[in-house]
Image (tube, rainbow, N blue to C red):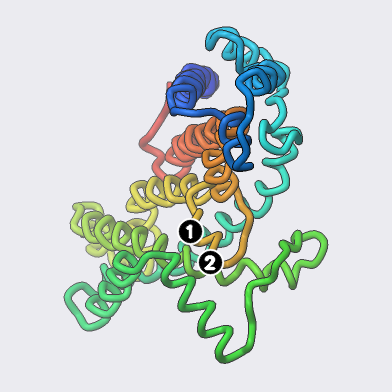
């Protein structure tokens, strides 16, 4: 087991290196750079000499391989450089927004699990009854409606009925837990509904498949109660695909909620990435893409470890 864990951790390195190379090359292939964008927004004519001086100051005049070597050398030292647009440290720019994005992803995941697992199991047990049909309609609604549209509806209802609007600034959880949760619970609900719809349908399908297995019939033949059969035998063995879906959705939520963040006036990782692309902020884009890639591969690693806990038949050597 130890050998497998170490091997999986080491395999993350070539994956992250490939992401770093692709991101670096693709961004350099996009026409224009941050210097041209900055001076073009001013509307005044700028000499080529001044543009060349600015590029040299930012290190953009070096050959591509030299820029890549400098950047990778900084990563080894855990130094991701400075934002080309704001001049602040890239780590500081990310740290300010990472807390918000992770907390929103965790809240949405907890809400999704609380909805998806019980309702998915109930729909499987009550297959082809009105309960099953109602839950399936509820889940299809979550798949059909975009989370940002649900967020707009939530804001309109809260504004009309309770005269509540999204606050202009983010309140950290440790500073004021009540204010923090009152700000993030609504976007978490909007995102978690769609998240739950996907996991709910997967839970229903997985439980239905497991309920037809021979060991379920054997447990019933031995006189085990239906609740014991479902909870102890069926649910645990049906959770593997559900856990996979939930983990992938969680990784996506960390940086993929750009429009929802705009609706609720949240300045998270997704909005930061879009702004960085718009400004051609190479160092910030590269760091953000690398961060999101790390979240995906690390979450997949944790899920593989969780498989061993859920299914004793799985062993890693």
Query: Are dots 1 and 2 in contact, CB under 8 Å?
Result: yes
Quadrant in which the C terminus appears: top left
Q: Position of residue 304 (x, y in %)?
A: 44, 35
Which residue in the protein does label 1 denote? 259
4 shown above or below 46: above
Q: Nearer the viewer, residue 198 or 184?
A: 184
Count the marks: how many? 2
Q: Residues within 10 Å of mark 1 (few under 14, many from 20)?
A: some
In the image, is 54 to the left or to the right of 315?
A: right
> Is label 2 in a helix, a strand or a loop?
helix
Residue in view at x 40 percent, y 69 percent:
118
Q: Nearer the viewer, residue 202 or 28?
A: 28
Write down the quadrant of residue 160 in the picture.
Answer: bottom right
Residue in view at x 28 percent, y 63 percent:
204
| Residue 13 is at least partly visible in this image | yes
Q: Position of residue 72 (x, y in %)?
A: 61, 15
Q: CA distance from mark 1 to mark 2?
A: 6 Å
Q: Position of residue 120 (x, y in %)?
A: 33, 66
| Residue 225 is at least partly visible in this image | no
Q: Nearer the viewer, residue 8 or 187?
A: 187
Residue in view at x 72 percent, y 62 percent:
170
Label at residue 50 = none
Q: Residue furthest right?
A: 175
Label at residue 263 = 2
> Is label 1 in a helix, a strand or a loop?
helix
Q: Position of residue 89 (x, y in %)?
A: 75, 33
Residue in view at x 41 percent, y 70 percent:
149
59 shown above or below 265: above
């Amino acid at each position: 087991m130890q050998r497998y864990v170490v091997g999986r951790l080491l395999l993350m390195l070539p994956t992250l290196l490939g992401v770093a190379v692709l991101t670096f090359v693709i961004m350099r292939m996009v026409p224009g750079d941050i210097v041209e964008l900055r001076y073009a927004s001013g509307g005044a004519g700028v000499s080529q000499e001044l543009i060349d001086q600015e590029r040299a100051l930012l290190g953009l005049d070096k050959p591509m391989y030299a820029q890549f070597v400098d950047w990778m050398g900084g990563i080894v030292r855990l130094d991701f450089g400075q934002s080309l647009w704001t001049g602040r440290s890239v780590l500081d720019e990310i740290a300010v927004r990472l807390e918000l994005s992770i907390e929103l992803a965790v809240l949405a995941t907890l809400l999704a699990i609380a909805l998806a697992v019980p309702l998915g199991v109930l729909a499987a047990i009550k297959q082809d009854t009105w309960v099953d049909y109602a839950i399936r309609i509820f889940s299809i609604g979550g798949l059909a409606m975009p989370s940002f549209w649900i967020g707009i509806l939530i804001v309109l209802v809260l504004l009309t009925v309770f005269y509540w609007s999204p606050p202009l600034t983010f309140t950290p959880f440790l500073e004021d837990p009540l204010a923090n949760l009152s700000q993030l619970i609504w976007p978490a609900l909007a995102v978690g509904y769609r998240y739950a719809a996907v996991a709910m349908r997967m839970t229903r399908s997985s439980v239905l498949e497991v309920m037809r297995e021979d060991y379920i019939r054997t447990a019933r033949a031995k006189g085990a109660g239906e609740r014991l059969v479902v909870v102890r035998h069926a649910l645990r063995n049906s959770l593997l695909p559900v856990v996979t879906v939930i983990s992938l959705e969680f990784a996506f939520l960390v940086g993929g909620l750009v429009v929802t963040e705009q609706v609720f006036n949240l300045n998270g990782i997704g909005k930061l990435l879009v702004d960085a692309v718009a400004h051609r902020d190479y160092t910030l884009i590269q760091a953000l893409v690398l961060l999101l890639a790390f979240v995906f591969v690390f979450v997949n690693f944790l899920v593989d470890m969780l498989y061993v806990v859920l299914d004793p038949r799985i062993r890693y050597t």
